[in-house]
């Protein structure tokens, strides 16, 4: 997106009530924690158009006495997590006030004292009431509020449209069936489907969604278990086979997807090497913006539907670093960024999924996001990954188990014990 249309769009959003629409109680409060700069440590923005920076610019215009800036860190979700731990411990040169955490990290960072909770007298109850239930729940740990959403997320299914009247829901059987109706080996599409199967958090997400989908198909729902996922060997066996396309006809899953993260999957879909892809809603904006220059697909030729089963709740939550010298001001900035006007801008300009319910009902959002209702439904029906302080260890064990089942063709008999040990931060008993 070039800078002129972007600046005009941001100006239009601001003029449409963004400045006056904020329900931030201390909009012109004095600099209570002393002079300084509020530093937000965040992963590189996934959305289009620099929407997050636009919000920081607005904050700085209205709060010149306490400016903020985003300090970016690059890399995968796993790399960013490790960097966030270092910033929380004060092991980096930059002194952080706010961390933009993956939703899975809230329990860990709260449990180990890396972040500070909201004092009970300062809990923004009105703002919390505007949030969708699943993003709101992800901000709590042990009954206390530790964060607020910068944006939410949930996995969705993208499809190349063959014509009008496309289905609003695709089953896995329909996806797999496309694998037997593809052109020759040298033609496009080369496979029916791709997700993210590289060895990082994306593989865990895809595995959990496959497990939940298979369980839903077998039992009609996903059971609430202490581990957040079934330990039934039959479900694991079928889910892993589905991940790699071993239980379908023809070329179901792109074999190259074992090296795919989100960007690689988007590129494969854009180049029409796959018919379907599992990705996050922000990919829609990426595809549309890219096609302005490459013209390989058009917005009308792309369909977005829910996944065949429950999606993983994604997104990032903003939390105050424990011991920040500007804790109260950091909380006010977080409330500003989590409020409905900010969420509206993030969705309209950046393509992020908004955490606030009212955003999805706005005319301008429906106009720029024809699949807003799909995104909202995906978030509302999503499931959280296991909220354990040892989530990185648990996620690693899920990936190890997937690799073993893929290689051996059978489920380890100690699967449940290994998952339990990982959830408690213990080494695997193997």
Image: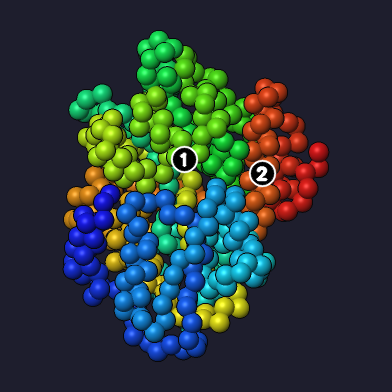
Rounded to the nearest whole Å, what is the CA distance between mark 1 and mark 2? Answer: 19 Å
Coloring basis for residues:
rainbow
The x, y position of residue 423, in whole percent, is 69, 51
The x, y position of residue 238, in whole percent, is 57, 26
Residue nearer the viewer, 179 or 198: 198
Taking the image as shown, residue 288 lies to the left or right of residue 79, namely left
Most extreme residue toward the top is 184
Residue depicted at x 59% and y 42% = 200
The x, y position of residue 109, in whole percent, is 61, 64
Q: Is residue 127 visible?
A: no
Q: Is residue 392 above or below residue 283?
A: below
Instruction: Give SS at disc 1.
Output: helix
Quadrant that contains the C terminus: top right
Residue depicted at x 63% and y 67% = 92
Residue depicted at x 49% and y 68% = 40
Q: Which sits earlier in the primary sequence, circle 1 or circle 2?
A: 1
Q: Is residue 214 above or below residue 87?
A: above
Q: Is residue 156 visible?
A: yes
Which residue matches tag 2? Answer: 396
Quarter of the image where one finds residue 106:
bottom right
Which residue matches tag 1? Answer: 262
> Looking at the image, do the residues carrying marks 1 and 2 touch, with CB atoms under 8 Å apart?
no
């Amino acid at each position: 997106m070039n800078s002129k249309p972007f600046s005009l769009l941001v100006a239009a959003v601001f003029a449409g009530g963004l400045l006056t629409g904020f329900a931030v109680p201390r909009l012109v409060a004095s600099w209570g924690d002393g002079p300084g700069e509020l530093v937000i440590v965040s992963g590189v923005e996934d959305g289009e158009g620099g929407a997050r920076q636009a919000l920081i610019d607005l904050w700085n215009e209205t709060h010149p006495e306490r400016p903020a800036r985003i300090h970016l860190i690059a890399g995968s979700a796993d790399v960013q997590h490790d960097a966030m731990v270092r910033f929380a411990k004060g092991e980096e040169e930059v002194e952080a006030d706010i961390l933009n955490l993956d939703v899975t990290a809230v329990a860990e960072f709260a449990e180990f004292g890396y972040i500070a909770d909201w004092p009970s007298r300062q809990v923004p109850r009105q703002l919390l009431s505007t949030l969708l239930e699943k993003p709101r729940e992800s901000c709590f740990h042990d009954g206390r509020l530790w964060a607020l959403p910068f944006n939410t997320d949930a996995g969705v299914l993208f499809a190349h449209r063959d014509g009008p009247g496309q289905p609003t829901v695709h089953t896995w059987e329909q996806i797999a069936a496309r694998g037997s109706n593809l052109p020759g080996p040298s033609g496009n599409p080369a496979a029916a489907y791709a997700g993210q199967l590289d060895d990082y958090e994306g593989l865990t997400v895809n595995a959990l969604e496959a497990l939940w989908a298979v369980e839903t198909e077998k039992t009609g729902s996903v059971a609430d278990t202490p581990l957040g996922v079934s330990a039934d060997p039959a479900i694991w066996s079928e889910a892993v086979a589905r991940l790699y396309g071993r239980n379908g006809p023809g070329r179901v899953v792109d074999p190259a997807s074992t090296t795919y993260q989100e960007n690689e999957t988007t590129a494969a879909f854009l180049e029409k090497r796959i018919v379907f892809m599992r990705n996050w809603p922000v990919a829609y904006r990426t595809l549309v913006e890219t096609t302005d220059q490459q013209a390989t697909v058009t917005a009308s030729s792309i369909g977005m539907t829910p996944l065949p089963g429950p999606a993983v709740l994604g997104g990032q939550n903003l939390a105050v670093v424990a011991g920040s010298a500007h804790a109260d001001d950091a909380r006010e900035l977080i409330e500003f960024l989590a409020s409905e006007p900010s969420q509206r801008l993030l969705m309209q300009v950046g393509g992020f999924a908004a955490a606030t319910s009212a955003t999805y009902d706005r005319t301008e959002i429906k106009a720029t996001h024809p699949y807003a209702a799909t995104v909202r439904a995906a978030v509302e029906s999503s499931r959280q990954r296991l909220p354990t302080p040892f989530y990185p260890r648990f996620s690693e064990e899920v990936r190890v188990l997937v690799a073993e089942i893929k290689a051996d063709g059978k489920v380890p008999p100690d699967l449940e014990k290994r998952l339990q040990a990982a959830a408690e931060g213990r080494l695997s008993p193997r």
